[in-house]
């Protein structure tokens, strides 16, 4: 398994976790945090702490995703001697191809028969 494949798997896992964390949040306070503090005196973890955890985990996962994407660019196997761009590769530039001249178009085409 190549290094790029490992980075690719990690990127997919982190992206999935980021989607889950974002979907759990609710900007109006009705997400996961409101279900823990729902109107009674008994609170599990507290509303503020759940919101802080989800907010911090969103930032950490987004930063990790960005770092993994940038690191995967270094791990791509480009092969020996490949140029960054084919337009910049001047060593193997093909010679220009001359196009054959076309004869002038004439109206001597056969008439088209109509279907009966």
Image (tube, rainbow, N blue to C red):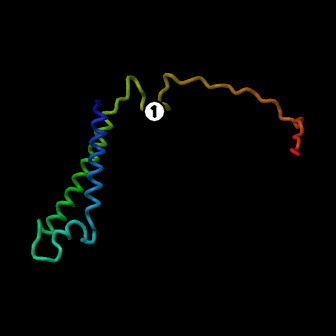
Q: Nearer the viewer, residue 71 or 83?
A: 71
For image coordinates 56% across by 23% down, the residue present is: 94
Q: Nearer the viewer, residue 88 or 77?
A: 77
Residue 86 rendering spot, x and y as whole percentages: 48, 30
For image coordinates 33% across by 37% down, the residue present is: 73
Residue 2 rendering spot, x and y as whole percentages: 29, 30
Q: How many numbered dots are placed on residues in this image? A: 1
Q: Nearer the viewer, residue 29 or 106?
A: 29
For image coordinates 89% across by 39% down, the residue present is: 111
**Circle 1 is placed at which residue position?**
85
Establish if 60 lies above or below 93.
below
- Picture quadrant where residue 33 is located: bottom left
Residue 26 rendering spot, x and y as whole percentages: 27, 67
Instruction: Classify residue 51 as left or right of residue 20.
Output: left
Establish if 82 lies above or below 52.
above
Residue 100 rendering spot, x and y as whole percentages: 73, 26
For image coordinates 23% across by 55% down, the residue present is: 59
Instruction: Classify residue 87 as left or right of residue 63.
Output: right
| Quadrant holding the N terminus | top left
Instruction: Classify residue 103 as left or right of residue 19.
Output: right
How packed is label 1: few (under 14 Cα within 10 Å), some, or many (20 or more)? few
- Picture quadrant where residue 106 is located: top right
| Secondary element at tag 1 | loop
Residue farthest toward the left in the current orientation of the protein: 42
- Picture quadrant where residue 80 is located: top left
């Amino acid at each position: 398994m190549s290094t790029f494949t490992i980075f690719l798997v990690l990127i997919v896992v982190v992206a999935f976790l980021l989607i889950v964390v974002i979907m759990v949040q609710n900007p109006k306070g009705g997400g996961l945090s409101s279900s823990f503090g729902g109107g009674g005196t008994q609170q599990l973890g507290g509303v503020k702490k759940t919101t802080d955890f989800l907010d911090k985990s969103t930032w950490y996962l987004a930063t990790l995703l960005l770092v993994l994407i940038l690191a995967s660019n270094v791990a791509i196997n480009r092969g020996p001697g490949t140029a960054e761009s084919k337009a910049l590769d001047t060593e193997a530039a093909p010679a220009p191809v001359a196009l054959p001249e076309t004869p002038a178009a004439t109206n001597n085409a056969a008439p088209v028969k109509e279907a009966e």
